[in-house]
Amino acid sequence: VQLVESGGGLVQAGGSLRVSCAASGLTFRWYVMGWFRQGPGLEREFVASIPASGETAYYASSVKGRFTISRDNAKNTVYLQMNSLAPEDTAVYYCAARKVETAEYSYWGQGTQVTVSS
């Protein structure tokens, strides 16, 4: 199984960025997909998740209303659209996959760096 993130980079505060995660080696539609992030000196935290059906996404309170998670099951890809970015959103963003019936994420990507300048 491979999860490969892309789309990170440097953006000014107030700007937008979309990161993507391409999955291979698994039956994508069987998996809940999530985004996590780890800022400098911080623990990894949950950002958003989306079920296999693509309905009823969940968000951390810190990003709700600014970030949107989506998935394309035909392309085995999950996206995170990030708007109104702030310096505190600076982090390495990771995608992860878990089967519906499990609570733990089984597979993780290598991460993509997002840096928001003030």
Image (spheres, rainbow, N blue to C red):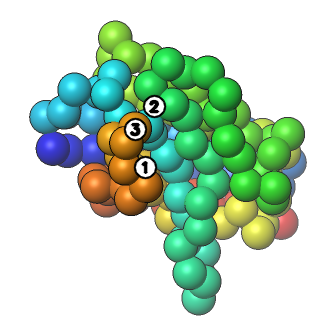
Image quadrant containing the N terminus: top left
**Kind of residue at disc 1:** Cys
Of callouts 2 and 1, the N-terminal one? 2
Residue at 62%, 47% in the rendered image: 48
Residue at 38%, 17% in the rendered image: 73
* Mark 3 Cα shell of 10 Å, populated few (<14), some (14-19), many (≥20): some
Instruction: For the residues labelled 2 and 3, say whether their Cβ atoms are less than 8 Å apart.
Output: no
**Which dot, 2 or 3, sits closer to the camera?**
3
Q: Is residue 7 above or below residue 86?
A: above
Instruction: For the residues labelled 2 and 1, say whether their Cβ atoms are less than 8 Å apart.
Output: yes
**What percent of the width, then of the height, locates residue 94?**
44, 56
**Which dot, 3 or 1, sits closer to the camera?**
3
| Residue situated in front as seen by the camera: 16 or 25 | 25
Of callouts 2 and 3, the N-terminal one? 2
Which mark is on residue 95?
1
Q: How far is mark 3 from mark 1, CA to CA? A: 16 Å
